[in-house]
Each structure stands twice: as structure tokens, then as C-alpha cells.
Image (cartoon, grey):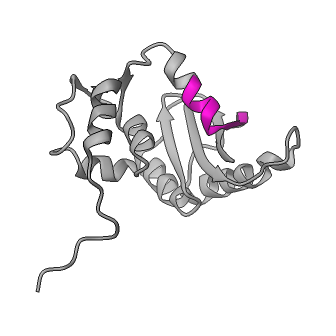
Amino acid sequence: MSWIVRVHAAGDGKVPAQAAEAMADELARYGAELEVRDGRYTAVFDLSGDLPNHSPRALSRPLAAFRSAAERAGMPSWPIVAAEAITKAEDRRRARTSPGAGLVGVAEVAEMLGVTRQRVGQLRGRLPEPLATLRAGPVWERSAIEEFETAWVRSPGRPRKAG
């Protein structure tokens, strides 16, 4: 079974950009991504396998990785205010029924396509035109990305180097 684990820390002030970049790099080692908003930062772990139900151990590794990455990156030492483990199916259900469910940004497109956010940036010329580009980045209609996904021909591995 596949799981999404989110760990949230919150406090006063802004997260320094350099620290956020460093934490994103640290979290990448665990296959996790970082989301930053004013007064909050969140790590999103995508896990496979069985997690012990209703057990604090279900969250112990992601919590330890979160704390370690935050400390090494120099993030604000805000308290962890929430942590949850949900199935990927439940995460998708919540995404479909949440406000703005018909709109997706880079993180959602990455999840839908099973790629990293960086790869979404590389696909920009092939993706449908975004509805808008906000300071947070481009925003697409979910249905346009779903159509793209059905027609997208993936090539496994890295492209061959010329020469």
C-alpha cells in the first residue's frame, strides 16, 4: 500500500529562502518534498509498504527525517504542530473534493504524473498552457493535465549524451 505522510511545523515569521532550499535538498534524500508558506513549513513523504495502523511508529521515521533535515538546513526551530499518515487513495480523494480541486499547481502536476517538481519544469514546453502564472507558479486545469497524461509517451531513463 502507498502512503502520504505530512509533517507540519509552524511559528512566527518567514522561512529564509536559503534554509528552505537546503531543507528541500535534505528531504530529497528521503524521497520527500518541502512546502513552505508564511509561518509554516511541511514535508511530504511518499511511502510504500505497510505502516502499522494506529501506531506512533507509523510516523517515527518521517518525524525523525523531518527534524534532522530541518536542523541541518538551519530552518526556524518551530514546533511540529501536526503529522498524519494517509493512504494515497485518501489523499487523491481529498484533493478532488477540496476547494479549488479543479485547479492544480506544479506540486499537484508532479504527483499526478509521478515525477518531481523539477521534472514538471522541464516539461513546461510540452504541458498544456497554464490558466495563469501566479507568484507561486503556474496553475492548470486538472482536466488538461489528465488529458496530457493519457497522451504522454514516456521514455524510461535519461536521454543519451550526444557524441
51, 148: nearer the viewer? 148
Horizontally, is 150 left or right of 6 in the view? Answer: left
Q: Nearer the viewer, residue 38 or 58?
A: 58
Q: x, y percentage for residue 31?
A: 55, 57
Q: Position of residue 63 (x, y in %)?
A: 73, 49
Q: Quadrant of the C terminus?
A: bottom left
Residue positioned most to the top: 99
Q: Position of residue 101 (x, y in %)?
A: 44, 18
Residue sitting at x 37%, y 47%: 117
Q: Residue furthest right?
A: 55
Residue at point 45%, 42% (across, down)? 111
Question: Which residue: 42% across, 35% down?
Answer: 108
Q: Is residue 98 visible?
A: yes
Q: Residue furthest bottom?
A: 163
Q: Is residue 138 visible?
A: no
Q: Is residue 130 magenta?
A: no
Examine the image and state in which quarter residue 140 appears: top left
Q: Report the span colored magenta.
A: 81-93
Lateral position of residue 55 relative to residue 18, left or right:
right
Is residue 159 positioned above or below 4 on the image? below
Q: Is residue 43 left or right of residue 38?
A: right
The residue depicted at 58 percent of the width and 38 percent of the height is 42
User: Farthest residue toward the left?
Assistant: 163
